[in-house]
């Protein structure tokens, strides 16, 4: 139950939270971004990369600065070298329906 600022209006709210755990989520759990923070040169490492895998580098406004699909399956060491202003960015990893977001700091 939520009461508005006027103290009179009352609304009932229902919040539903669903948690899904599947095998493919585990494929996304072993992603490492090294080093972090960095100067724009870093490695994305995965011990067991799924066959369908991509990532995006996103700035604070939501603009996609880099988008890449990575072929093959198994161990991955993806070297990334970007020239960006110092700040906070996001790396968005996708595999099928699974998505994982990591914070990236550029110094």
Image: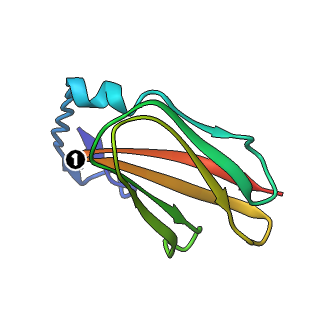
Residue at figure coordinates x 24%, y 54% from the top left: 9
What is the quadrant of residue 73 in the picture? top left
Answer yes or no: is residue 31 visible: yes
Residue at figure coordinates x 79%, y 51% from the top left: 38
Vertical side of 23 occupied by 32: above or below: below
Residue 97 percent coordinates (x, y)? 21, 46
Residue 107 in the figure: left or right of residue 47: right
Q: Secondary structure at mark 1?
A: loop
Answer yes or no: is residue 21 visible: no
Vertical side of 3 occupied by 57: above or below: below
Q: The C terminus is located in which quarter?
A: bottom right
Along the line of sight, the residue nearer the viewer: 16 or 76: 76
Along the line of sight, the residue nearer the viewer: 63 or 96: 96
Residue 6 percent coordinates (x, y)? 36, 58
- Crowdedness of circle 1 by 10 Å Cα count: few (<14), some, many (20+)? few
Along the line of sight, the residue nearer the viewer: 11 or 63: 63
Vertical side of 31 occupied by 22: above or below: above
Residue at figure coordinates x 16%, y 42% from the top left: 12
Residue at figure coordinates x 70%, y 50% from the top left: 42
Residue 83 in the figure: left or right of residue 25: right
Q: Which residue is mark 1?
A: 96
Q: The N terminus is located in which quarter?
A: top left
Vertical side of 64 occupied by 99: above or below: above
Image label count: 1
Along the line of sight, the residue nearer the viewer: 15 or 89: 89
What is the quadrant of residue 41 in the picture? bottom right
Residue 28 percent coordinates (x, y)? 38, 34
Residue 18 percent coordinates (x, y)? 18, 32
Colouring rule applied to residues: rainbow
């Amino acid at each position: 139950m939520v009461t508005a600022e006027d103290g009179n209006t009352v609304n009932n709210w229902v919040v539903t939270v669903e948690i899904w755990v599947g095998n493919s989520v585990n494929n996304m759990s072993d992603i490492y971004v090294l080093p972090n923070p960095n100067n724009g040169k870093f490695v994305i490492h995965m011990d067991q990369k799924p066959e369908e895998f991509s990532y995006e580098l996103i700035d604070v406004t939501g603009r996609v600065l880099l988008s890449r699909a990575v072929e093959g399956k198994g161990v991955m060491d993806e070297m990334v070298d970007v020239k960006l202003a110092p700040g906070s960015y996001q790396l968005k990893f996708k595999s099928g329906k699974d998505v994982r977001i990591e914070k990236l700091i550029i110094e």
